Amino acid sequence: MAAASLALAAGMPYSAKAALGQPEASVTADAQTLRGSIKSTDTGNYRVHLIDLPSGTVLREYATLGGIVFAVAWSGPTIPNLQQSLGNYYASFVKGAQASRTGHHQLQIRQDDFVMQSSGHMRAFTGRAYLPLAIPAGVSLQELY
C-alpha cells in the first residue's frame, strides 16, 4: 500500500490549493484542478466539501468555521492526488510511508501535528489525514471518514 501510494502520488503534478492546513477559500479551485464536482455542507462545528472525482473516488475536505482545512478523507476505486490534498504535509507522508511497517495493505503515520491512515487494495481505497491540534472542539475522529 505504501509503495502504491508513493508511486501514484509521486507522478502527479503539485498545485497548492485547498490542501490540509491551508485556507478553505480555494476548495472550489481544488475541485476544478481535480476535475471533480463539489457539494458543501455546514455541520455547525465545521464545513465538509465533498468532491466527486471522475475516477469515482470521493474526496472530503473538512474545514473549521474559521476557514482552515483540518482534515481530508477519501474512498473509492483510486487514491486521489495526495500531493494536492496533503499540501505542505506531503513530505511527512512520503517520509512516513518509507518508514512504515504496518502491513501490505495499510499505512499509519502518527506525528504530533499530522496523522494519516490509509488502506485498501485495487479499486477499493480509503484513507484520511488530519491535523490533531486543528480539529474543532466537539468533533470526533469517527466523523472524519
Image (cartoon, helix red, strand yellow):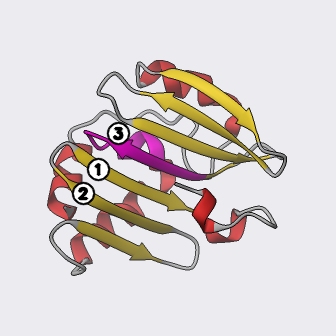
Q: State the residue in front, 141 or 6.
A: 141
Q: Position of residue 81 (x, y in %)?
A: 35, 39
Q: State the residue in front, 39 or 3.
A: 39
Q: Of the two numbered discs 3 and 2 on the same chain, state the one appearing first in sequence.
A: 3
Q: CA distance from mark 1 to mark 3?
A: 13 Å
Q: Residue at x 25, y 77 (%)?
A: 100
Q: Quadrant of residue 4?
A: bottom left
Please provide the residue range marked out in magenta.
71-85
Q: Are marks 3 and 2 in contact (CB under 8 Å)?
A: no
Residue 108, placed above or below residue 122: below
Q: Of the two numbered discs 1 and 2 on the same chain, state the one appearing first in sequence.
A: 2
Residue at label 2? 120
Q: CA distance from mark 1 to mark 2?
A: 4 Å
Asked whether 79 falls inside the magenta stretch, the response is yes
Q: Position of residue 72 (x, y in %)?
A: 53, 50
Q: CA distance from mark 3 to mark 2?
A: 16 Å
Residue at label 3? 81
Q: Quadrant of residue 39?
A: top right
Residue at label 1? 125
Q: Position of residue 60 (x, y in %)?
A: 53, 41
Q: Look at label 2 and name its amino acid.
A: Gly
Closer to the observer: label 1 or label 3? Answer: 1
Whether residue 91 appears in this view of the structure is yes
Q: Look at label 1 and name its amino acid.
A: Phe
Asked whether 8 falls inside the magenta stretch, the response is no
Disc 3 secondary structure class: loop
Q: Quadrant of the N terminus?
A: bottom left
Q: Look at label 3 and name its amino acid.
A: Asn
